[in-house]
Image (spheres, grey):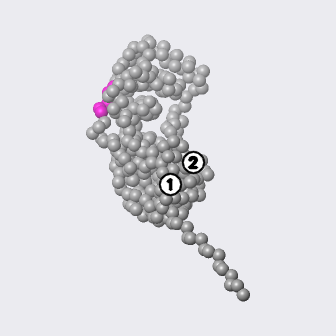
Amino acid sequence: MTGNAKAEDLVVRIKPARTHGRLNLSWLTSKVVVAAVLAAGAIFMGVMYVVLQDAGSFSRRKIEFPPLPQLNSSITAAQERLHANPQDITTLVELGTLHFEKGKEFYPDAINELEEARDLGALDPRIFYCLGIMYQEVGLYPFALEEYKRFLRHYPEDKEIRMLEAKLLYKQGNYPEAVTEFERLKFHFPSDSLIEENLGLSLWAAKSVDRAHDSFSSLRTMGGVQGARAEYYLGQIAAEKGQYQESIGHYLECQKELANPELGLTPEQVHAALATAYQKLGQFPAAKPVWEQVVNETTGDAKKNAQKSLHEVVRRLPAPPPAKKPARTKRS
C-alpha cells in the first residue's frame, strides 16, 4: 500500500487570470498546478474503490435549469445585462451557473464568471458548488477541495459534497482527514455500504489495519458485491499478516461473485491472490490449477509473471510415487 501525497506538498491556491475575452484552459497546465494535482497511488494492486455515486445535483437544492433552447436564450439575456453592468453580481452568478450547466466546453467561461462574482463580494453557495465540480472535472483537486469545504460551511450535512470532499482527501494522501469525514458520514448514514467501504479503505491506507478489518467485516455482512469485495479486502489484510490460510477462505468467498460485472474486481486479481496464498503455504497441487487460470486470463507482463509462478509451482510439486511392478504369478 502506498500513500505518497503529503499535506506539505500541496501548493497554495493560484487564482486564474481574468480576461475580457473567452478564457481558455491553458492556465490549468502550468507546472505549479501540475504539481498540485499529483495524487496518491492505489493502496493495493492498483485498485482503489473510493467510488462515488450520486454526484452533486442541483435538483435536490431546488435549482432547475431550462432545456437547451431556453438555456441558450437565458445565457444571451444574462450576457446583455452584464454588458450594461459588468459588475452585476447576481447576473455573473447566473451566467456562471448557466455556463456550468451547458457542459465542460464552457467551464472556462463559468469559472471566470463565478470567480469574478466572488471577487466582487458574492457569497452564493452555488459558486462554491459549481467551482468545486468543475475544478474536480479538470483534475484540479486541491482547488476543488477548497470549494467543497466552503460549500459545506453553508450545508454541513450535505451527503453528496461531503463524499466528494472525502474522496479528494483520500486521493491527495490525506488519509486521517478522509477517515474523519467518512466517520462523520457513517454517523448519519450507518447502513450505507458505500460509506462503509470507503471508510475501510481510508483506515487501511492510514495504517489503522485493525479498524479497517472491523469496517470490512461490517461491510461483509451487507452481502452482495460489496460483501464480496469485503472478502477480498479481508483476504488481502490476512495475507499481509502472513495468515494465508485465513486469506484463502476470504478469496474463495469472493470468487462466488466473480461473474457479476458490478464486483469491480477482475478474475485474475482474485485468482492470483488465491494462487499466491496456496503457494505461500506450500500447497503446490492446489496452486497449480489456479496459476493456470491466471495465465489464461492475463496478457503482457502479468502473464509472464504468472507463468514464472506456475513454473516454480510445477518444479516444486511432489514427485509421483514410483510405479508398482506387476505382481509375478507363481508357476504351478
Horizontal relation, residue 298 to residue 145: left or right: right
Mark 2 → mark 1, Cα distance in angstroms: 16 Å
Residue type marked 2: Glu
The residue under the point 44% across, 16% down is 22
In the image, is residue 154 above or below residue 252?
above
Which is more N-terminal, label 1 or label 2? 2
In the image, is residue 92 above or below residue 320?
above
Depth check, front residue: 20 or 286: 286
Please name the residue that numbered disc 2 is placed on: 297
Within the image, what quadrant is residue 292 found in?
bottom right
Dot in front, 2 or 1: 1
The label on residue 311 is: 1
How far across and down, in percent of the image, does residue 118 sit?
A: 37, 26
Depth check, front residue: 172 or 185: 172
In the image, is residue 75 above or below residue 215?
above
Q: Are marks 2 and 1 in contact (CB under 8 Å)?
A: no
Residue found at the far top of this picture: 84
How far across and down, in percent of the image, does residue 124 sit?
A: 41, 30
Magenta span main SS: loop
Horizontal relation, residue 101 to residue 34: left or right: right
The residue under the point 55% across, 31% down is 64
Tell how many labels. 2
Horizontal relation, residue 16 to residue 258: left or right: left
The residue under the point 50% across, 46% down is 304
Depth check, front residue: 126 or 232: 232
Within the image, what quadrant is residue 82 found in?
top left
The residue under the point 49% across, 59% down is 315
Which type of secondary structure does the marked residue at label 2 adopt?
Answer: helix
